Image: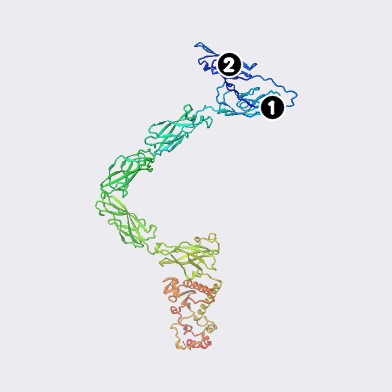
Amino acid sequence: WGPACPPPGTVLCFFCDACKKVVLKVPSHLQADTLVGRVNLEECFKSADLIISSDPDFRILEDGSVYTTKDIKFSSEKRIFSILLSDSQKLEEKNIEISLLAPEKKMPVKRHSKDKGLKRTKRRWAPIPCSIMENSLGPFPQQIQQIQSDSAQNYTIYYSISGPGVDKEPFNLFYIDINSGDIFCTRAVDRETYDSFQIIGYATTPDGYSTDLPLPLMIKVEDDNDNAPVFENMVTFTVIENCRVGTAVGKVVATDRDEPDTLHTRLKYTILKQNPEHPKIFSVHPDTGVITIISPPDREACSSYDLKMEVRDMAGQSFGLSDTTTVTVHIQDENDNAPSFKKTSYVTEVEENRINVEILRMDIEDKDLPNTPHSRAKYIILRGNENGQFQITTDPMTNSGILCVVKPLDFEASRQVILQVGVVNEAEFSKGANNRGVSTCTTVVTVNVKNVDEGPECQPPVTVIESQDGMPAGKEILGYKARDPETFNSEDLTYRMLQDEDHWFEMDRKTGNLKTTKILDRESRFVKNNQYNVTVLAVDKIGRSCTGTLVVRLEDINDHSPVIKDNVTICRHGDEGAVIEAMDRDGPTNGPPFDFKLDNLSNKLWILRKKSDTTAIIQPREGLKSDFYSVPIRINDRHGNGEVSHLGVRLCDCTLPSECKMKPFGQVRDVSPPNIHLGRWAILSMVLGSAMLLCSLFVCFCVTTQKTVQKCFPEDIAQQNLIVSNTEAPGEEVTEANIRLPTQTTNICEPIISIGTLGGQGTKTGGQQSFEMVKGGHQTLESYKGSGQGLGDNGRYAYTDWHSFTQPRLGEKVYLCGQDEEHKHSKDYVLSYNYEGKGSVAGSVGCCSDRQDEEGLEFLDHLEPKFRTLAKTCINK
C-alpha cells in the first residue's frame, strides 16, 4: 500500500465559472468552527456588502472562508447550499452554489472461517514525497495526499497518521480520512517556520490488526517569495583621498529568509543615487555588494558621500522584492596640498643687542584638513641665519610663523640682515594619484638693525691663559680685556673680580691684570680639569658693564709623592695577602706607574710584589704573629720622586678579612714596628749581654777608683783585681819615665767619682748617678737623634738618650745573630773607636797613688813582676 495522488482539481475545484457552482471535498465528519474551504467572492460580486448562507450549519466570512457552526456528519455523499451576495445600493443580488462531497462509505468485509490467516503479498507501501505551497489560500481543508494499502482489496482497512503537524507541534495541521486514506491540510503554513513535516501513516483492520508496516511520509513546504531581502545595518566606510581606481571601499551585505539557492534568494545590488552626484566616484558589484572606486576622490572637493543602495531578489527582476539603505563614505585627508605664504616678502626692524624679542609674524594657507599634521606648518630659515641669531616657531593656535631674535645683533657689524624662510608641513608630502611633485614655498624677510648707544663688550666671553703650577705669590699675569664697541678700545674701562673662589689673585682695576696672592696649586679642590676660573666685570663710565671669564690653565709639576690610600687586613690562613693601592695628586704625566720597595729589615718580615701600575700585593713571611704592624714602604712615581709611607697592617688569625675579630685601626693607638721580632734565644742573649755590661761597668768602677788608707779598698781586693788580667802576651817593660801621672791628684774617696764608659764618662755626685755620652765619639747616635737633638751642656748626651740609642741596636744585633745560619755573632755596628771623648777628670792611672797619704799601699809589694815597675813608680811619686 502507499500514497495515491488525487486527481487534479480536487483540492479546490471550480467546476464552473464564478457565481455559478463550487464543489468542495470534505471528510465525512466535520467539527464545529472547522474551515471547510474558501470561495473567491470578489470575482463573483466585488461590490457585495451582504453575505448570507442558505444553510445555518455554515457561516461565510468576508474573505470567502466557509466555517461550520456545529459538528456535522454527512449521512449522504453530497450536501448542497448557496451563498447569497447582495449590494444594497445597486439593489443587485447573486447566488453561489456550494456542493460538499463526502467520501463513499465502505462496507466492512468479513473474513470467512475458512481463511486461516492473512496472506501477505507484495504490496506498494513506500513513501512518495509530496508538498504543499507556503501561504496557500486554500480552500481548506485542502487535500494534499492519499495513501492506500493493497490489503484494502481483501479487507476493510482503516488509515491513521501521527507526527509533527498531527499530534505534535503544530497540532491539527494535517488529518487523514480513516476510510479513503486522503490526507488534508487545514491551514496555511509558513516555510520559514516549518520547511517540512515527517509524518507516519498506519493501515489497520477494524480489529486493530496492522496489515502493513508504518509508512514514513515526507511533506515538504514549497517556498513562496514572501520575504524581502534586508540590509544588515547602516554602514559607514572611509577611504583615503587620491586612491587608485579599483580600490575597494567596503562591502554591503543583505539577507533573505526565503529558501536558499533559489531565485527567491538570488540578490542583486545597485547604487540608486550618489550625493553629491558629480563626479561619479563609486560603483558596486551586483552580486558581491563590494563598493569600489571608479574615479580618485578629492577631500578638498568633497569630504564625504552618501550612497543610496538597493538590494532586490529574483536576480534583480522588477517583480522581485527589494530593500534600500544609505551608505556614507568619508574621504580621509592626506597631505597632498603644500602650504604657501600669503606674501612673497616681509620687512621688519629691531634694535641691536635685543634678544628674545618677537619681530615678525607670517601667515600661510593650506587646503588640507585643519589642525592635523597635514596642515600644521613647520617653518625653516633657509639662509641668512648662519650665526644663529634668529629663531622661528609656529603659533599652535593660528598656525602663523613667529620670527624672534635670540642672539644680539650688532649695528656696527651689520646694519641689515636678509633671511630666506621656507615652510613645510609636519607630515610628509604625498604625491597622490596625479603624481604631483612637492616644492617648498619660500619668502624673503628683510631685518633692519637700529643703532643704539651700548656698553662695553666682553669678547670673547672666555679667555684662557697659561700658568705654571706652584707659581709663588706676587707674580703678575695677564688679565681679561674688554672693549668699547663704539671706539674699539679698552680705555675708560675699569675691572673688578666677581668670583675668585680661593682668593688666588688681586686685580688691577685699570688694566685688568692679575697678581698672585698665594702659591698656585693645581691640586687645589677649586681647580677642575687643570683650570681655575675667575669671573671679571668690566664697567664703563656711566655704569654699563659686561661679564667675562678668565680661565687660568695650570701646567702640572711633580710636586707630590705617591702615598698609600688605606690600611689593610691580612688573614694568616689566606695565601693571597692584601692589595695596597697608592695615589698621587699630580697629573698622569707625573703619576703612575709606581715603584714599591721595602727596606732591608722589612724585607725579612714581609713579601711585596707589584700587581699593576698603582697597586701591589703584600704578604707576611712565616713565623710572624698576629698583631698590628706599621710597614715602611717607599713608593716612587714614574720620574723617581717618592717618599716612605707607613702602611698599617692588621695581621689577623682568620680566613676572610671580614671575619677578623681584632680591633679596627681607628681604635689602636700604637702599632708595633714590623722589623723587631725576638725569639727566645734573642731574649736570652739580651739578658746575658746586659749582665756582662753591668759586670764590665762594675770592674771599671773598681779599677779606676782611688782610695786612701783602707776605707775604699780592702786588703785583698786590689790584688785580686790586678791579678786578673786578659793579657795574651808578656807586656813590654815599662820604665818609670814612660809613666806620666797627673799633675793634680784626686782623692778617690771624694764625693765625685769618674767612671770610664764606652765612648764617654759617668759622673756620680752626691749619691746620684748619671751617664753622659761625649759628643763626637759615635756617629750612629747622631743619625738616630738628629743633628743638634738631645745635647746638653758642653755637648754631652743624657743617659736616657744613650739608653734609647743602645737598646734597639742591641736588640737588632741579637736578632741578626739569631738569623745567621751558623749562629755566629754578627759584627757590631759600632766599629769606630778612634775617639774616646774628652779627658777624664780622674787623670791617668797615676790616680792610684796619693803623695800626701801613702798608707794602705802595702798590697803593691805583692804584685806580679809585670806590675812592679808600676808599683815602684807609685811609691816613688
What number is the disc on residue 838? Answer: none
* Vertical order, 52 against 528 (above or below): above
Under mark 2, the amino acid is Ile
* Vertical order, 792 against 54 (above or below): below
According to the picture, the residue beneath numbered tag 1 turns out to be 211
According to the picture, the residue beneath numbered tag 2 turns out to be 98
* Vertical order, 391 against 775 (above or below): above
* Vertical order, 174 against 769 (above or below): above
Q: Do the residues labelled 1 and 2 touch (CB within 8 Å)?
A: no
User: Could you say whether the residue bearing mark 1 is in a helix, strand or loop?
Assistant: loop
Colouring scheme applied when the structure was drawn: rainbow
Residue in front for this viewpoint, 274 or 428: 274
Asked whether the viewer can see residue 313, the reply is no
Asked whether the viewer can see residue 83, the reply is yes
Instruction: Tell whether 437 sits left or right of 864.
Output: left
Residue at image coords 39%, 59%: 524
| Number of numbered tags placed on the structure image | 2
- Tell me if mark 2 has few (under 14), some (14-19) or many (20+) residues whose alpha carbon lies within 10 angstroms of its own: many
